[in-house]
Image (cartoon, rainbow, N blue to C red):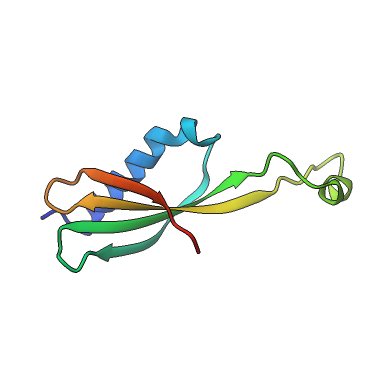
Amino acid sequence: MIDVKAAVSAAYQYLQFLQDTMGGKLEDLRLEEVELSDDKTSWLITLGYDLPVKNRSQLEELLASPSRPKQTFKREYKLFRVNSETGEVEAMKIRAV
């Protein structure tokens, strides 16, 4: 069985590999949750990250200083199922909070 560190590393590498297809650079990538499934066949890894919001509201645009524009971000989470024997990422899902 792979350890938790290897499972987290597999999920992180998987997300990094897909980053360009997910709408841009992921900011503030962090480990949020780790759980071994009840049957011990999978590690469930939740990673959180910030994505820039592309369409800011008019109010946000007005409040942004011209010399220092404010970038707004949206926090998103992905849940990864990593096989506890092989270390292969078997699934990536949106993790709603």
Location of residue 39 with respect to 75 vertically, above or below: below
Location of residue 4 with respect to 18 vertically, above or below: below
Quadrant in the picture for residue 31: bottom left
Q: Nearer the viewer, residue 94 or 43?
A: 94
Q: Nearer the viewer, residue 10 or 38?
A: 38
- The single residue placed furthest to the bottom in the displayed view is 38
Residue drawn 39% across the image and 41% down it: 15
Relative placement, left or right, of 23 versus 68 is left
Residue 7 percent across, percent down from the top left: 24, 52
Relative placement, left or right, of 77 versus 41 is right
Can you say which quadrant of the picture contains the N terminus?
A: bottom left
Residue 10 percent across, percent down from the top left: 27, 45
- The single residue placed furthest to the top in the displayed view is 20
Residue drawn 21% across the image and 43% down it: 88
Residue 63 percent across, percent down from the top left: 86, 51
Relative placement, left or right, of 72 versus 31 is right
Residue drawn 86% across the image and 51% down it: 59
Q: Nearer the viewer, residue 97 or 10?
A: 97
Residue 81 percent across, percent down from the top left: 28, 52
Residue drawn 79% across the image and 42% down it: 69
Quadrant in the picture for residue 66: top right
Relative placement, left or right, of 19 versus 39 is right
Number of numbered markers: 0
Q: Nearer the viewer, residue 11 or 6?
A: 11
